[in-house]
Structures are given as structure tokens and as C-alpha cells.
Amino acid sequence: MDDQEFVQLLQSLLQPDTERVKAATGTLNKKYYTSPQSLVALIHVLTTHGDSGLRQLAAIEARKLVPKFWGDVPTNQKPQIRNQVLQSIFSEQKDIVRHGTSRVIATIASIDFEGGQWGDLPSLLMNGANSNQVREREAAVHVIFALLEIPGEYMDQDRLWEVFSKTLQDNESAAVRANTMEALSRMAMMIEADEQEDAVAKFQQLVPTMVNVLQGFIKDEDEENAMKAFEAFQTFLGCETALLAKHFGDLVRFMLHISVNKSLDDEFRNQALAFLMQCVRYRKLKIQGLRLGEELTLKALEIVPELGDLTGEEEDVTPARSALGLLDILASSLPPSQVVVPLLKAIGPYVTSEDPDRRRAGILALGMSVEGAPDFIATQLQEILPMVLHLLADPSVSVRAGALNGVARLADDLAENMGKEHAKLIPALIQNFDMAVNDLSGPNGDANLGIIKGSCNAVDSLIEGLEPEDAAKYVSELIPRFIKVVGHEEMKTKMAAVGAIGSVASAAEDAFLPYFNHTMQILGEYIMIKGDSDELDLRGAVCDAFGKIATAVGAEPFKQYLGPLMQSSEEALHLDHPRLRESTFILWSTMAKVYEQDFDAYLSGVVKGLLESLEQEEPDEGGLELSQQANEMLGSLMEGKEVKQQSSASAEQEIIDVEEADDDDLDWADFDGATAIAMEKEIAIEVIGDVLTCTKSKFLPYLQKTVEVVLGLADHAYEGVRKASLGTLWRAYACLWSLAEEQGMEKWRPGLPLQVQPPDELKKLGNLVMTATLGVWQSEEDRGAVTDINRDLGATLKLCGPALLVTDKPPQNVVEDITSQLLTIITRSHPCQIDLGGEDDPDLLEESSEYDWLVIETALDCMVCLSAALGPSFSALWREFSKPVLKFVSSQEATERSQSVGSIADCIGNMRDAVSPFTGQLLKVLQHRLGDSDSDAKANATYAIGLLMANSTDERELLAALPATLRKMEPMFGAEGRVLDNACGCVARIITSYGDQIPLGEILPRLVENLPLETDYEENKPVWNMVVKLYQAQNPAIMELTPQIKPALEKVLSPPEIQLDEETREQLMGLVQFLKA
């Protein structure tokens, strides 16, 4: 081996010369890195060469060659090499070289330990950590840190705790303290709380000291070591909850204190806020149990006024931006009582402050909380709206920009509620738009450009919540304004205007037609645009707008543009622009919805493009190629210079900041699957679902390949791909089912064994999809994915019945598996409902965040759909479901009461007479809810009792309950909406079942005077069925009420048609003829 040439080649890798680096890399790979001697030579360079840059490069390369060649190094050389590398690290003066050497030692040790060699290394390191020499302590602790990353326990744990308790308080070296924090983060990852109580106790004892270490780094403005300490605390959050449990509240408040301290460096505050966000994400039950939500909310609000100027394009992480992010995650993770309620109380002084930064902070904070608690915010809109309107007229441009952002966020999540206020909001938005347009050339030009974009975005979000007739009122005012802005030179302004045009068209529908062709002509200029990223972003926005316009005007008017647009969209896939690719996919989805089976001419290209997207390779979780990794490490070898270096793997040049590169940074363990390709796949899968649903039989030639590809993505690393895959697979099953029914298959009937047998291809597909669903469902940790699985499975059960429950393997169905999963969710013990580590019991908490409840609500809905598929046989499962479901009936939360009672009602209807054994149990809880303060809970209880009266055969229980039931319902006849309608339906069912047991002459007039029903049209069926039966029996009580019945009949038989189903309509037409006679 030519040692001189070898060293020269290594030195060539340090030169800012692309061709020279490529040549040296090739020679090293082919000539030297094929022999164990290259490893020995690299270690020799690492331990003896005078150039620290070369030593660091040798460490990187040696570390990678150890697994390949260490076993082939002559046994008699190994002791000398081990001693040589260990001594070198204790004498090495460069931190970055020491760190690289630590990795080499750890990699060698990982092999040696397995073979029972280098047994004295742990003891040598322990001694080094206790050395009187600072440099030796620093090196020893860092090697221990590296060794702790090796699977297996090779270190004396008791002695480690003793060592770390000292090194954590090393007064001479910040590096020792920081390295100890890193090592403790690896120790924490190995602790099993149930089995290592002593280790938990020792760790807990060190937490206050670790806090002091971080506090010291911050005080000394030691950013490098502070970041290591912050990272350690972040790691602790991912470990057993018991480790931080004792000090958790104090730790949160400590980080909160850092966050609000304006005298500290922003990076420290950002890290503290990041820690708090992770606390809420992974320890939300603990946060909620300690009632820290309000304190976190109010402190975050204090930080938001620091936002400063937002007119520029920079989006650096700042404490104020991080605080808004914290408010967002707080609102979505904790109950409204701990976040939104205190926030709404607190923002009053903010929005009335003389300081415009505080006024803006108030409305921005409110906007950030809407997505997490839309239902609660909706109940407060009457108080919120005047404040928003006031801020839209604020003299400060920045405050108005914040108010426009607030309107957009409110409308995004409360479109219908906000849409009702259009008469106040849209004129205010137009006024802001006009003021800004007229002052673009003034000193506030950039700020006013922001107002124009904000106005467009606010209209974009708000207008889609309007009814078409309301949106139509604004077309003539909005479209001409936005068309003019499309001609502005600033790209983001153009895009905002284009987005608003699409939304106005979509909302206004036919009223947009007069502007249709002119708008298409103006926007059409950009549909073929090619250029930089901003121009392709604009092309994507136009693509989105065209989809909305097509939805508005319909298939025939848009037909002339369809061919060129589809051609342009297929070309767009090859422009290497993610935003444009996603817009293309969404356009295809929209066109499939507009043209349905007439879209078949484009299916071949569409399916090809979508499947190619799904079959893209994604980055592996493993490390980089050898030469590429060396190139990426180039920065640390050049002592703080910026160099351009071409990767031999990608042949793309990139600039590397050499001060920041460190071998420790090459950690791929946090890869979570949410790559740009993965997010594109999520959209592509959803679009395939739309296309196959809309094109139906025309999609059949592509169905097998589509199912094959999508099924392979059901266990993808990214939750968005997982839930989209399962959703699309169930849509494929439902589509096939509908086609089978169209071809003559009988409609399904409830119960097992199946009374209607589906075709074999449906059985096979159902088995595949159900197997994939159960595989993901039981272990899925993402709340949104579980919610979607609940919805998809429930919707398919409702549409297709029990066939999908049947399998070809014992026990021949999956009813038990589905029941188990639903019960796990309903009892709040599913992985997606438990904090990381799972120490806290979610069932002990009295409240849920809206999204936490949504998981349970959709599980209840799925339970109802299961009961519909099984029919009377569901009664056996109700014995399992009843206790946890009935627990929600007495919840302190009105939403939980109303929705659980509604689920019980539907299950009663689906079980029919099989509900009889549960009559007494259900009557007791439902009668209590008849007096509920919440109108929805009361209405649902009334509905449920009516169904129980109609279906149960337990006459003794029912007749005993009749007087109290009628007495409690009597006041409801003076109510409105669903309460009144459900009371009428309930009484109608009682009359039908037990009319001879009640004072019909007293009750019937109260019912008839409230006909026809005006809110809950479904209750028209039992009411009018009862009326018809009484007439058929020539009951005197109904005969006397004929003058009141006739006008009610006339109204219910008039539009809207949805008042009655066809069967009831036919009955009433017969009744009309009878009354005429």
C-alpha cells in the first residue's frame, strides 16, 4: 500500500476543486477501500497526522470501514490500534476530531464487545471521566455517550449513575456537562420504568441538576452546549413518562420562563417554546391533568406582540412565530376550558390596546386557535364578530392585515357560520382592498400589497361558506377587482387574486357565467407558463382556479377548455415542481367529478400519472453513500470556510456551512416518513379515490393495478399515506359493490350468516382491505388517521352491509376484531389516545379536546353502522358496548351527552325487538336526559325513547314508564327545532304502539297543532304513519282534528320534496283522496 499516495488522496478531498475530489474519491474506492490495510492506515492518520482537518476526515472514513474490515485486521495488531486510538482521543485538542474519534472507538467496541474483547474499555472510560485532566474527562464522557448508542448493556449502570452525578456538575468544563446531558439522554432511552425503579429514581434525582446545567449555559450565552441540553430534554419527552413525572410541572414552568424572557437570545427562547410544543404533543394528558393549559396559553399570548414587520418574505423561526405555533397545538390538544376560554377572556385588552402590535397579536392568536376548537369558537361568534369588524377598520395597516388573516382562519374552519355574516364582512373586505389598491405607490406600498393579498385570501375562505344566491350578490363587485390584480407583477399577489377568483366562481355557480369566458382568457395566459418556481406556483394556482370554475359553470360550458387543460396538466407533471404536480392531481379529481363517466377519454393518462407518482422511490432511512457522506462532512474539515462541492452520488453542487457540520449531526433516526414525495403520494391516492368513484365502470380496466399499488402503501411510514390508502381502498370496494347492485345483485340484508352473497371479486377485495385496515387500526398512533379509519369503515358498513365482515379464515368474520378496536377507542385506551409512555389515565380527565372527542365520536358512529349491518344480532355486542357508551350519557360535556344518546337511539332502531332485554336500563338513562339543559341531548333522548317504545317488546317496563315520559315531554311541544319535531315523532310512536293506554284526546291535538314538522323531516314518517293508521281505524280523536290535518297535509305534500320519503308520500296521497271522499 502506497501510504504517501493514500494521504495525498485524502488531502485532495479537502480541496475546493470538484473534479479533483471526484478523481480522488474514485481512486480511494477502487484502489484502497477494498483492503483492511486502508482501515489501519486511516487510524494511523487519525492518531498521528498534524492536520486536524485530515484527522477528522480519517475519523469519518475509518468509522465506515470498521464494520467491513475490523474483523480482518490481524489479531496481533488490534491491541496496539485500540490503545493508540484511545490515547489519541485523550490528547486530541480539537473537539470535532475528538467527536469523530469517539465514533470510531464506539464502532470498534460494538464489534469487540460481541466477541468478548476490549473488556477493560468501560473501566478505562470511567476512570477517564473521573480524571483530574479536563480534556480526558471531556473525551471519556463523549466516548461513553457514543458507546451508549450501541445496542446491549456493556457498561456498569450503577457506576455510570455515580459518574454522571459528578460530571453533570463539572465546574471546569461546559463540554463535560453537555456531553453528560447527551449521555443521559441515551441512558433515558434504555430505561424500562416498570422493571428499573431504581434507575428511574436516580434519573429523577438528577433532573434539577440538569435544569441547572441548561440554566448555566443560557446565562453564559453558550449556544452550542445549550442546544445539546435542550435536545436532551426533548429526548426525555420521548422516553418513559415516569422519568420527568416528578418534576414535569416545574420543568414546563422553567421552559415557559425562558420563553417569555425578552432579554435572552431568541434561539434559547425558540428552543424552550419547541420543548413546550413537544410537551403538549406527547404529554397532553399530563399538561391537562396539571391544568397548565391556561398558563401556557396566556404566556404564549404575551410573546405574540413581538412579531414585528411581516411584510417581507422572510419566515425565520422567531419566539413570536413559535408562540403562535404553541397556541395552535394547545387549542387542538387540550379542552377549550384550558385554552380557548382563557384566550378569549385575555384578548379583550389586547384588541383595545393603544399599541397596534398588541391589537394585531390579539386577532392573530384568536385565528391560530380556531382550527383546534371550531365547535366552541362557533358558539362565541356573536361576541367575536364585532371585534373582528372593528379591527378590519383599524387605522394601522398591520392590524388590518392581522384582522384579514383572522377572517380567513375563522372562515376556513367555520365557513357556514361566518358565511351567514357576509353582509357585514364582505363590504369590509372590499373596503380594505380598495384602500390598499389606491395607496400602492405611497410609503406603505409593501404593507398595502399585503392588505391586497390578505383581502383576497379572506374572500377566498369566506365566500365558499355562502349559499349560491348570496354569493351571486358579490360577483360583479369582486371579479372585476380581482381580475385587475392578476396583472400585478408580484407573484404572490397574483396567486392570491387567482385563488379568490376560483372561490367566488365556485360559490356563485350560475351567476359567474357572464364572467366565465373573459376570466378563462385572462387566466389562460398562465396555464402553460414555464420558468422559475414562483411562476410554476402561479401556474398551479391557475390550475386550482380552473377546477373551481369548471365546478361552477358545469360540464357543457367548460367542455371547450377541457382538452387543452388536460394536455397542459399532463405536461405539468414533468416540470419537477411539487406544488404544480399536486395541483394537477387535484384538477383531475375535480374534472372527474364534473364529467363523471364522460371523463373516460382521459383515464389512461390520468391513471398512468397517478400510479407513477405512487411508485416513486423514497429516501431510505439508512445513512449516505461513503463518498457522499465524506463530501457532506467537508465543512468540518475546512475550518469555517464556505466551499462548493459536488457530490459524486448526485453530481449536484451544494454549499456547505463548514462551521456547523459534525459527525454527530448525521443522525437519521428521526426520519418520520413525511417527505415531499410522501405528501404528494397522499394527494395522489385521494385523487385516485375520487376518480374511480366518479368514473365507476369506466375505471374497471385500471382497478386491479390500482388496488395492488395502493394496498402496498397501507403501512407507509407517513400517516397521511396510510389513511389515504385505506380510504381509497374502501371507496374501491364501495364502487364495486354499487356496480354489482346495478347489475342485479340484491340489496344487502342485516345479519350473519349473509343472506345476500356478493360476487367472488368483492369477497376477495373485502378480505384484502379489511386485513390491511385491522393491521393499521390497532397500532395507529395518529389521531387523525384513526378518525378517518372509523369514518371509512362505518361508511362502508352502512353502504354495503355485513358482507365485508366475512372472511375466509377462522372465525369466518372480523366482528370480534372490530368490536375490540371500537371499545379500545371508546374507553380512551387506543394508542392514539395515550401519551407517549402511557403513564396517565385519560379516563380520569373530565374533558376532551375537540379532536380527541372526534376520535370517539367517529368510533360511536362506526358502532352504529356495525349495528345496522348486524341488525338484531348486534344485541349480543351491546352488552359489551353499553357500559362505556352509557358513561358518556352522564358526561359534563353537552357534546358527549348528545352524541352518545344519538348513537344509542340509532342502535335501538337497528336492533329492533332484540333491544328488549335492555329496556329498563335504557329507559332509566334516557328519561333522565329528557330534562337535559342541552337541546341536542334532549332531542336525541326523545328520539331514542320513541324508538324504544316502537321496538321493545318489554311492555311491563314501557307501560310503567309511559306517564313519566309523557309528562316530561309535554313542555317540549312549546319548543322549537329538533326538540319539538322529535317530541312529535316520539309521541307518534307511542300512539302507534300504545294508543289505547294513553289519553289520546288530550295528547293528539297538541301534536297535530305542530304539523307539519319544519326541521327534522325524518320524523315526518312516524308522525304521518300514525295519522294514516288512526284514520284507517276511524279513530274519533283524529276525525275531530281533520280541519287541522288538511292544511298540514297540503304543506307537507308541497315542496321541498325532501319532507317525505316516497312510501310516506304515497300513503298521504291516499289519505288526501280519503278525506276528499
Image (cartoon, rainbow, N blue to C red):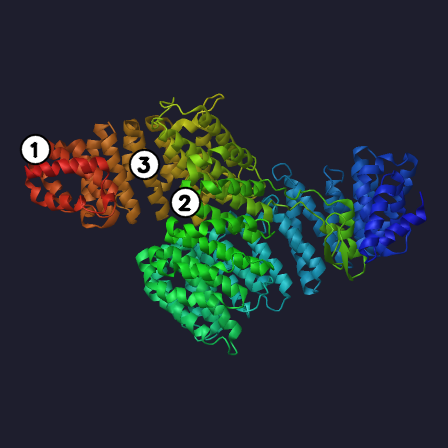
Q: Which mark is residue 906?
A: 3
- Total residue callouts: 3
Report x, y in % for residue 643.
77, 60
Q: Earlier in the sequence, mark 1 or mark 3?
A: 3
How far apart, in angstroms, are the residues tagged by discs 3 and 2? Answer: 36 Å
Q: Earlier in the sequence, mark 3 or mark 2?
A: 2
Q: Amino acid at mark 3?
A: Asp
Q: Which mark is residue 1034?
A: 1
Q: Amino acid at mark 1?
A: Gln
Q: Secondary structure at mark 1?
A: loop
In this view, the residue in front, 914 or 486, is: 486
- Residue at 79% in and 33% down: 114
Q: Residues within 10 Å of mark 2 (few under 14, many from 20)?
A: some
Task: Give yes or no for contact between labels 1 and 3 (Cβ–Cβ under 8 Å).
Answer: no
Task: Say above or below: 715 vs 350.
Answer: above
Quarter of the picture holding the C terminus: top left
Q: Quadrant of residue 857?
A: top left
| Residue 963 visible at all | no
Q: Earlier in the sequence, mark 2 or mark 1?
A: 2
Q: Secondary structure at mark 3?
A: helix
Task: Give yes or no for contact between labels 2 and 1 (Cβ–Cβ under 8 Å).
Answer: no
**Pair 2/1: label in front:** 2
- Residue at 80% in and 36% down: 111
In this view, the residue in front, 362 or 605, is: 605
Q: Which mark is residue 595?
A: 2
How far apart, in angstroms, are the residues tagged by discs 2 and 1? Answer: 53 Å
